[in-house]
Amino acid sequence: MTRPEGRRVSRRDVVGERYWTSSVSRVDESTVRIRGYDLEELIGGVSFSAATYLLIRGSLPTPEQTRMLDAILTAVLDYALEKPGTVAARYVMSANPNVAAGLAAAVLAVGKNTLAPEDTARFAIESFDRLQVSDRSAAEVAEEIVSEYRSSRRRIPGLGHPVFKYVDPRAQKIKEIAETLGFWGPRAAFYETLHAEFGRQTGRDWIPVNDVGMMALVLVEMGFTPDETTGVAILSTLPGVIAHLTEEQESGRPIRVIPADSVEYDPAVRDFQADKEAAGW
């Protein structure tokens, strides 16, 4: 390939297209457009929940979709100091009194063991797909899936809570609203079959579907991808984190550490010189 001296070859030169394309938003001299809509019309014209749906899914939501997403965004507002992300955020704030740093810490604590619905979403989608191609009943497929997970010592995502038994009240409320608004679909229903089968096989029928698991089921039925469900879950918890960061900053207690009486330290005392010689120095 020849090129003028000193000119770099761009991606467009190579593949005949621009390096990035985006339909999320665009800005010109006088207008900001969100998914093609003038932002000035959206300001005051739709709720934050509706605008969130528009941005993520790419189309204006129906009133029912907006109410459902609003309920989901309210379901995990806060969980006191029992949420690792909140504790991490407050520790960071005590050392670096900066809201952005605290929020970043809270977001980085989201994952497989807390707040992220994506594993449940994938499990629900894949399990239902398996049912769809099977010639067996839902009960038979559920028995097989749960047996496989148990034999391989894998945890079924979306089940269990350290406090709530039998029913997670937040999850139950989400389900009730989803049923009322028409967002309780076949994937969610089959997941309930799996949940019941898990209780039957393990004898632990007191283990509930948790709030994050229920969020995953309903968001999947609304058309959100598994990865998007975690983004929505993070968004839902940020107001609570902001409140905790403000409280931490106003407490006037800098540099929090784990209290000494909460830690058991190894009492060993080692001889550095002797060990150094023994190591061949």
Image (cartoon, helix red, strand yellow):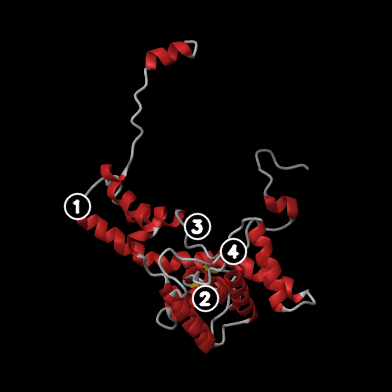
Q: Is residue 190 left or right of residue 281?
A: right
* Residue 46 picture location, percent across and down: 44, 82
Disc 1 or disc 4, which is closer to the eye? 4
Residue 80: horizontal and vertical position, in percent? 33, 63
Residue that mark 4 sits on: 156
What residue appears at the point 60 percent right and 69 percent down from the top-left corner?
A: 198
Q: Which-is-in-front pick, marks 4 and 3?
A: 4
**Mark in the foreground, 3 or 2:** 3
Q: Nearer the viewer, residue 5 or 137?
A: 137
- Mark earlier in primary sequence (3, 2): 2
Question: Pointer 3: what residue?
Answer: 113
**Residue under label 2:** 53
Image position of 239 (left or right of 115) = left
Marker disc for residue 178: none
Sequence-wise first label, 4 or 2: 2
* Image point (59%, 64%), residue name: 156
